[in-house]
Amino acid sequence: MPLYDGYGVLVGTLHNYYCDRPFSGTEYYHCNLKVRAGARIFRCPVDLDSKKDADGMHWRVVELGSDALQSLLHLREGWHPLDSEPDSGALDYYRSPELQPTGKCIEALPDSANTATIAEGALYALWKYGTGPAAFRDLEPLLVHSRKLFIFGEPFRRGHGVHNIHQNQGDPPQSRWYQENGIWQDGAVVVQRRDKSVAAFLCKFKTQSFFPDSFCFRPADKEVRRAKNEN
């Protein structure tokens, strides 16, 4: 089933942003982007609510090649509906080759600790897991250095805005959002920086499936596996 109110991408520039108070007992934790497109300001809440779980959020920052998403980079400011199919400009976390699909993930740590753990230089191609505020620490630098924003997701039913700016597939059958599972309709924050480089912030909830299944590990796990292999 597709998203009820359609799917597409908002093109604009960053007006401002702010985050909700973390771990409110009554509200979801969102980081709200205000995006200017022409004369309008669109509100784009990025849901980073980890349900107080230390590993409730999964996210990636993917550096995109110079040829990736070329058809979108030249779109005028405003909302653009996209068909949920390949070659329309739609994103799929596991089917869009430019997103370098992977099911591997690592615990979010201070940058120096992560760098020491993953020496292959592919840290930002992996999924991280942690809390919503930890995820925002990776999103914020993209916003600060943005020249143009591309917000993928579902349009507001009323008013000007975009939500479901996260994975929109893999919800379990008991989930209230199960009926909206679908391919080629994933949300994301794609940023063109001032130096013309492009990066994508992708996020999902722990309750949503990976495709393929994930391989998550903490830094200590690597040492445990190494010790087992040596015995």
Image: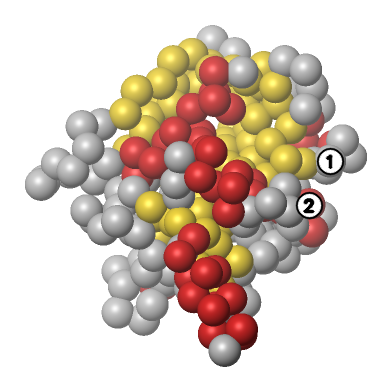
Q: Is residue 65 above or below residue 161?
A: below
- Residue 175: percent from the left, percent from the top? 31, 72
Q: Please report the residue visible at 61 percent of the width from the left and 69 percent of the height from the top.
A: 103
- Looking at the rendered structure, the secondary structure element under dot 1 is loop
| Badge 2 amino acid | Glu
Task: Using the image as rendered, state which of residue 135 and residue 158 is in the foreground.
Answer: 135
96 lies left or right of 203: right
- Residue 38: percent from the left, percent from the top? 59, 13
Give the residue number, with chain letter if any, for mark 1.
65
What is the basis of the colouring in this image? Answer: secondary structure
Question: In terms of sequence position, does the residue under pointer 2 or pointer 1 come before the other?
Answer: 1
117 lies left or right of 48: right
Q: Please report the residue visible at 11 percent of the width from the left and 46 percent of the height from the top.
A: 26
Q: Is residue 71 above or below residue 101?
A: above
Tag 2–tag 1 contact (CB < 8 Å): yes
Task: Using the image as rendered, state which of residue 188 and residue 87 is in the foreground.
Answer: 188
> Which residue extends farthest top?
39
Q: Which mark is residue 105?
A: none
Q: Residue 68, located in which quarter of the rendered image?
A: top right
Give the residue number, with chain letter if any, for mark 2.
98
Q: Residue 200, located in which quarter of the rendered image?
A: top right
Q: Residue 133, located in which quarter of the rendered image?
A: top left
In the rendered image, which quarter contains the C terminus? bottom right
- Residue 16: percent from the left, percent from the top? 44, 15
Q: Is residue 201 above or below residue 220?
A: above
44 lies left or right of 6: left
Disc 1 crowd, CA 10 A, few/some/many (<14, 14-19, 20+) = few
Whether residue 185 is visible, yes or no, is: yes
> Which residue extends farthest front?
231
